[in-house]
């Protein structure tokens, strides 16, 4: 089956008790057993819930994975992956990554004796000088949030295999419609399903997809033991969101391209970061490993002051000033004070994330309205 058909039918079986075409929201904490240990596969809702099972099946289908696991948020899914490790283990992570992932790594897990190296992975070989016998995990975000840097997933996967370490790819920005990292050799894919998978800015959710049953079992054990599970209503919302992923992504890509070129040609705009420009770094890799370039981008102004950036951020009328991304509506964001405020300033600047950088999540509205809005805000 082609992806558009798979997306609509993934995990969707008519409800066995009524034939309902949409998966019911099984709002229950427990399940009645016929006799001790004799049940229908469901015992207690932290361990299993039928709405979650349907979603996890759908999530696996989307990433060409054997298994999917869903969590109460993207960071909860990330947390589960790091809990595969033990004190003394080391992780090599992208240096330009979501601020919340950086905060979890540096403020929560470092004190449990896990060491993180933040590396510019524009050239995959840059990771080599940080590898030692304790290296157990590579954490790659591509495209990165917010500078849209691209890492060659196949190249890092080959290095990870050579050193028997795991590769987890945060695929939030691309969505499975544009990129499927397991096909490129990754071991685990992570999503903040809060973003493109949910797609409607109405749910916080995270997930992991993988092919190895042993890895699935370890992660399921962590999910069940640590308890960061989603409620059935949230699972339903993500399931419903997924059904239109392909049509939303097509429009995000079309609108994204038009807005990226509009910004690039605007006299008051200095630099636009969008991975679909032919002259953007690693464009050839992006073109090879992605099926489109999406609607995420960031830019700086010629007048590179925080005041001017703040004026633009406060002047849009269609783009809403808000954290998050990947919803149907367009959002404008100031990474330095919003999504990436948890990264120390020196660290941010070192990685090219300036105080005046503006990030856009281009939605699926009429693109002419979006361009007009940005035009009046930039002035
Ligand atoms: C790239 C990326 N990864 C992970 C997360 C964390 O996901 P959540 O907010 O669903 O916990 C986010 C959230 O913004 C993100 O943008």
Image: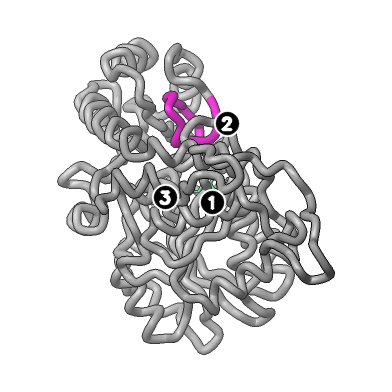
First in sequence: mark 1 vs mark 3:
3
Q: Nearer the viewer, mark 2 or mark 3?
A: 3
The CB of the residue at mark 1 lies under 8 Å from ligand 1: no
Left or right of 378? Residue 40 is right
Residue that protrudes farthest toward the right in the picture: 36
Q: Mark 1: give few (<14), some (14-19) or many (20+) Cα within 10 Å.
A: many
Q: Earlier in the sequence, mark 1 or mark 2?
A: 1
Residue at 55 percent across and 42 percent down: it is: 23
Helix, strand or loop at mark 1: helix
Q: CA distance from mark 1 to mark 2?
A: 19 Å
The residues colored magenta run 322-335
Q: Nearer the viewer, residue 260 or 302?
A: 260
Q: What residue would you read off at disc 2?
A: 202
Regarding residue 110, the answer to whether it shows in the image is: yes
What x and y, as percent, mark residue 32? 80, 56
Callout 3: few (<14), some (14-19), or many (20+) C-alpha neighbours within 10 Å?
many
**Relative to residue 84, is residue 122 depicted above or below?**
above
Magenta segment, prevailing SS (helix, strand or loop): loop
Whichever of callouts 2 and 3 sits on the residue coming sooner in the sequence is 3
Q: Is residue 215 above or below residue 58?
A: below
Residue wearing tag 1: 54
> How busy is the neighbourhood of tag 2: few (under 14 within 10 Å), some, or many (20 plus)?
some
Q: In the rendered structure, does residue 370 fall within the stretch colored magenta?
A: no
Is residue 29 found left or right of 273 in the rendered image?
right
Q: Element under label 2? A: loop
Q: Residue at x 55, y 33 (%)?
A: 323
Q: Which mark is residue 10?
A: 3
């Amino acid at each position: 089956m082609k992806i558009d058909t798979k997306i609509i039918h993934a995990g969707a079986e008519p409800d066995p008790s009524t034939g309902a075409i949409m998966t019911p929201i099984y709002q229950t904490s427990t399940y009645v057993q016929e006799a001790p240990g004799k049940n229908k596969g469901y015992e207690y809702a932290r361990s299993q819930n039928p709405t979650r099972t349907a979603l996890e099946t759908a999530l696996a289908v989307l990433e060409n994975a054997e298994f999917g696991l869903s969590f109460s948020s993207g960071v909860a899914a990330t947390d589960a992956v790091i809990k595969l490790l033990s004190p003394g283990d080391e992780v090599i992570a992208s240096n330009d990554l979501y601020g919340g992932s950086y905060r979890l790594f540096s403020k929560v897990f470092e004190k449990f004796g896990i060491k993180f190296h933040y590396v510019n992975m524009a050239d995959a070989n840059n990771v080599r000088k940080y590898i030692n016998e304790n290296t157990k995990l590579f954490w790659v975000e591509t495209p990165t949030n917010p500078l849209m840097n691209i890492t060659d997933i196949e190249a890092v996967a080959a290095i990870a295999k050579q050193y028997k370490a795991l590769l987890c790819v945060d695929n939030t920005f691309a969505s499975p419609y544009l990129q499927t990292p397991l096909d490129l050799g990754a071991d685990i894919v992570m999503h903040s399903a809060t973003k493109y998978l949910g797609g409607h800015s109405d749910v916080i959710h995270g997930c992991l997809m993988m092919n190895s049953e042993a890895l699935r079992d370890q992660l399921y054990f962590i999910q069940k033991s640590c308890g960061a599970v989603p409620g059935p209503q949230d699972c339903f919302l993500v399931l419903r969101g997924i059904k239109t992923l392909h049509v939303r992504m097509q429009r995000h890509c079309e609108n994204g391209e038009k807005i990226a070129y509009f910004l690039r040609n605007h006299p008051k705009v200095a630099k636009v970061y969008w991975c679909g420009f032919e002259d953007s770094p690693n464009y050839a890799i992006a073109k090879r490993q992605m099926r489109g370039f999406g609607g995420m981008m960031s830019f700086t102004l010629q007048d590179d002051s925080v005041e001017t950036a703040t004026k633009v951020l406060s002047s849009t009328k269609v783009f809403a000033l808000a954290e998050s991304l990947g919803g149907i509506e367009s959002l404008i964001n100031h990474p330095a004070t919003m999504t990436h405020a948890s990264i120390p300033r020196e660290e941010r600047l070192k990685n090219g994330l300036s105080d005046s950088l503006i990030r856009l999540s281009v939605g699926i509205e009429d693109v002419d309205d979006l361009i007009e809005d940005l035009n009046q805000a930039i002035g």
